[in-house]
Image (cartoon, grey):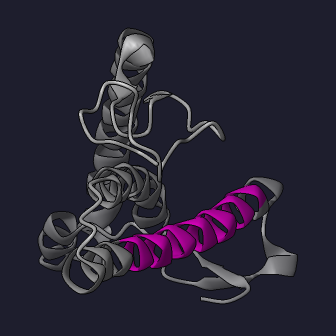
Amino acid sequence: MSESVLRDSGQAVVREAMTPLEKIAFTLNWVLERVCAALAAAIVLIIWYGVFERYVIRAGGAWTEELSRYVMIWLALLAVPCAAYYREHIGLELFLARLSLKQRKPVMLVLDIISVAFFLFLTYYGILLTKDGTTAYATIFSMNMVIPSPRCRCLRPSPHSSSSWP
């Protein structure tokens, strides 16, 4: 859907006819989709480089595994709002497809309330886990796991490693 949003009634609405809230949601989703695409491309490149480094160069750096895991987590967490924006959830779609249009509206309202409650729960406990994770370190990168840092020492061994570095 390029410049339109799909309302509950199934009607596509062009950008000019969107409400201000729909415009904000559309723009946020548009940005998130591009960020997710960039992260997906990054994870593919990181893994390809890791395979090349391990099997062609025979260097075998472990930093690609940790970085790809870190990027995958961010990708998964940022992709959830994109799926929620389009109401794309395989389990819900199968359930809703069996209902008539008249039955769908109240069910969709209940599902939206459950979804919002679940996302608030995740947000609350995610903040608590983030606070607990401020002391967690990515050992290979020697960086905090809460916020990515430009101090990332990806290609240098950690000072605690037994390998020598020229």
Q: The N terminus is located in which quarter?
A: bottom right
| Residue 101 appears in the picture as rendered | yes
Magenta-colored span: 24-46
- Lateral position of residue 125 relative to residue 41, left or right: left
* Quarter of the figure with residue 56: bottom left
- Residue 89 x, y percent position in the rendering: 26, 66
**Residue farthest toward the right in the current orientation of the protein:** 16
What count of labels does the image hold? 0
Q: Residue at x 33, y 70 (%)?
A: 88
Q: Please, is residue 15 above or below residue 149 in the view?
A: below
- Lateral position of residue 120 relative to residue 22, left or right: left
Q: Residue at x 31, y 24 (%)?
A: 160
Q: Residue at x 40, y 71 (%)?
A: 46
- Residue 102 x, y percent position in the rendering: 30, 69
Q: Nearer the viewer, residue 123 or 5?
A: 123
- Lateral position of residue 26 relative to residue 154, left or right: right
